[in-house]
């Protein structure tokens, strides 16, 4: 596969609907300290049945932003049954596993453990305390849900990701694509296919190393 040149420079913004803009501002601006940096007031926008709305943005660092839409005339009823899983606008049924629900989330990174613990302090002193603090393979994260029911993560790297791990990631994804194209994919089949790819590509890696010396 031909390498495509990488021209993007990160996230401009991610956007979500909010049913409670006041609590959303309290959470992101007043608790976490993310300043409001832009807003759009839209009246009579789009088709006749499109509600008037406010689109507002918070700075999350590195010229990236998180944004929300508040549509006038809409309320909690859009979210369906109270207590259902997921955020207020996209509920999951009771039969959907919790791990699937939690897989939809936004993660923002900080520089180090000191910064991570500072955000933990701010959240724990608010109406949205930290629900989990977990060390993964290379990162440590804290999690909570924002006022709209969106799972929100702040994470810090515990160590750099090595070039060897990048290579392993590409092997894993190539193996995954092969396995899911066949009936009944399993984790065991993924590992077996990955081992096959390592054997197939070993000679090319050796040549690349020798040419780089």
Image (spheres, helix red, strand yellow):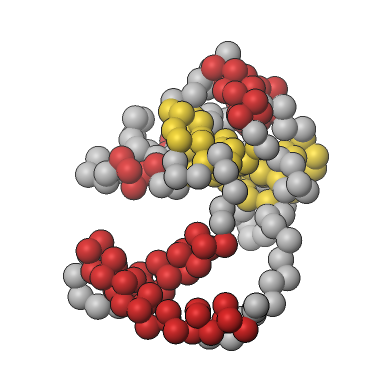
Residue 54 at x, y percent in the picture: 70, 42
Residue 18 at x, y percent in the picture: 57, 38
Tell me if I can see residue 26 in this picture.
no
Residue sitting farthest toward the top: 125
Q: Residue at x 70, y 22 (%)?
A: 30
Residue 89 at x, y percent in the picture: 46, 43
Q: Is 111 located above or below residue 6 in the figure?
A: above
Q: Nearer the viewer, residue 172 or 99?
A: 172
Q: Nearer the viewer, residue 79 or 131?
A: 131
* Left or right position of 78 against 49: left
Tell me if I can see residue 4 in this picture.
yes
Q: Is 1 located above or below residue 84 in the figure?
A: below
Residue 21 at x, y percent in the picture: 63, 31
Q: Residue at x 57, y 62 (%)?
A: 163
Instruction: Report which quarter residue 8 is drawn in.
Output: bottom right
* Left or right position of 171 against 71: left
Q: Nearer the viewer, residue 86 or 162?
A: 162
Q: Residue at x 31, y 72 (%)?
A: 195
Q: Is 147 located above or below residue 106 in the figure?
A: above
Q: Nearer the viewer, residue 87 or 61?
A: 61
């Amino acid at each position: 596969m031909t390498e495509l040149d990488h021209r993007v420079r990160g996230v401009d913004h991610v956007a979500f609907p909010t049913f409670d803009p006041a609590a959303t501002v309290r959470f992101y601006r007043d608790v976490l300290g993310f300043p409001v940096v832009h807003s759009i007031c839209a009246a009579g926008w789009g088709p006749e049945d499109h509600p008037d709305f406010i689109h507002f943005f918070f700075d999350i660092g590195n010229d990236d932003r998180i944004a929300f839409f508040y549509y006038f005339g809409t309320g909690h009823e859009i979210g369906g049954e109270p207590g259902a899983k997921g955020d207020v606008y996209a509920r999951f049924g009771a039969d959907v596993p919790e791990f699937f629900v939690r897989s939809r989330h936004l993660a923002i990174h900080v520089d180090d453990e000191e910064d991570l613990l500072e955000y933990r302090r701010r959240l724990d002193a608010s109406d949205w305390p930290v629900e989990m603090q977990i060390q993964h393979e290379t990162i440590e994260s804290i999690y909570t849900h924002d006022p709209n029911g969106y799972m929100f993560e702040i994470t810090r790297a515990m160590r750099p990701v090595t070039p060897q791990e990048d290579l392993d990631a590409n092997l894993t994804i190539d193996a995954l694509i092969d396995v899911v194209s066949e009936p009944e994919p399993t984790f065991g089949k993924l590992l077996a296919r990955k081992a096959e790819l390592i054997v197939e590509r070993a000679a090319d890696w050796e040549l690349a190393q020798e040419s780089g010396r």
